[in-house]
């Protein structure tokens, strides 16, 4: 994919997406488009149900926006958001604005996730992290804002006061602290991280394909909605306009899951 800037490997129903631009996996426009291509493959291929994103090596997951390249070319938003020359349809890093990506993604943070690298991570659904990894948002010290997702999402993921201080200071957040604030599901020794992500992805992939996508769709739709509206609008057979959720009542998989429970056997889902 785009000169191997991103490696994508199928493992059963799981697509492993590896950022592969050593030494720090900094994201330029070409890499961003390659990342979108990998995420789009996951979304569009019915045989795939879950994704893992990680980086090459153990030191750095992703250093974010390629500032060295930008220092040479300057900031040009027309080029950044050009459909063919820019970051691509999914926004920065191919995922930060990929709102139609409904299949679950596990981030296996194997090293430092800095700036846009952290914004890739918090665009995922579940975050697993190496004990030696850390987060940082140093944009304030670069004269810019972390507006490819961190400013918008982080205060919703951790206590707002902690998010503000972290955004303002540019300091490092070690794995232990990230887990304490609930940003990370679990931390692992470096050698155990990817096996743990694979095991989790395999477990998730046992779920019905339509329901897996519907869950992510519903969670995004109800984000920020009060509980009364959420319960009133989002219900089976309701007029909510949600594509995947709307398919569940008449899906073969829903009946298969119910019959499998009644017959005390494992379900065989077909994504229909």
Image: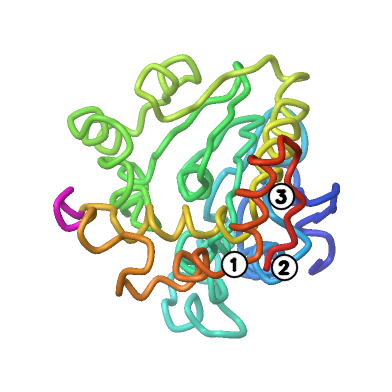
Left or right relative to 126: residue 45: right
**Which secondary structure dominates the residues rendered in magenta?**
helix
Eyeballing the image, is 190 above or below 246? above
Residue at 70% x, 25% y: name it.
193
Location of the C terminus by quadrant is: bottom right
Does the magenta portion include 254? no
Residue 129 percent across, percent down from the top left: 59, 26
- Residue receiving disc 3: 19
- Residue receiving disc 1: 251
Residue at 42% x, 25% y: name it.
172
Eyeballing the image, is 3 above or below 16? below
What label sits on residue 17 in the rendered view?
Answer: none
Residue 1 percent across, percent down from the top left: 81, 66
In the image shown, does 97 or 78 lie closer to the viewer?
97
- Residue receiving disc 2: 41
The stretch of residues the image draws in magenta is 225-229
Task: Look at the numbered discs 1 and 2 and tell me whether their residues touch, using CB distance below 8 Å.
Answer: no
């Amino acid at each position: 994919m785009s000169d191997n800037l991103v490696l994508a490997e199928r493992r059963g129903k799981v697509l492993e997406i590896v950022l592969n631009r050593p030494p720090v996996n900094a994201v330029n426009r070409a890499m961003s488009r390659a990342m979108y291509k990998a995420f789009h493959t996951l979304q569009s291929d019915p045989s795939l149900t879950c994704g893992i994103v990680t980086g090459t090596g153990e030191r750095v997951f992703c250093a974010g926006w390629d500032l060295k390249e930008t220092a040479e070319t300057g900031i040009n938003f027309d080029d950044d958001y050009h459909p063919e020359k820019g970051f691509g349809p999914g926004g920065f890093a191919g995922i930060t604005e990929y709102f139609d990506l409904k299949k679950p993604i596990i981030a296996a943070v194997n090293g430092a996730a800095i700036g846009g690298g952290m914004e890739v991570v918090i665009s995922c659904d579940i975050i697993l992290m190496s004990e030696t990894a850390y987060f940082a948002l140093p944009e304030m010290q670069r004269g810019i804002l972390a507006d490819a997702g961190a400013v918008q999402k982080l205060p919703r993921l951790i206590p707002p006061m902690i998010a503000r201080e972290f955004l303002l200071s540019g300091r490092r957040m070690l794995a232990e602290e990230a887990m304490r604030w609930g940003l990370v599901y679990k931390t692992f020794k470096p050698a155990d991280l990817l096996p743990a992500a694979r095991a989790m992805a395999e477990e998730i992939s046992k779920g019905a394909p339509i329901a897996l996508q519907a869950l992510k769709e519903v969670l995004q739709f109800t984000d920020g909605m009060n509980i009364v509206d959420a319960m009133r609008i989002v219900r089976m057979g309701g007029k909510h306009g949600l594509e995947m959720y709307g398919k569940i009542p008449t899906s073969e998989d829903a009946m298969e899951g119910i019959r499998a429970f009644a017959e005390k056997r494992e379900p065989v889902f077909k994504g229909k």
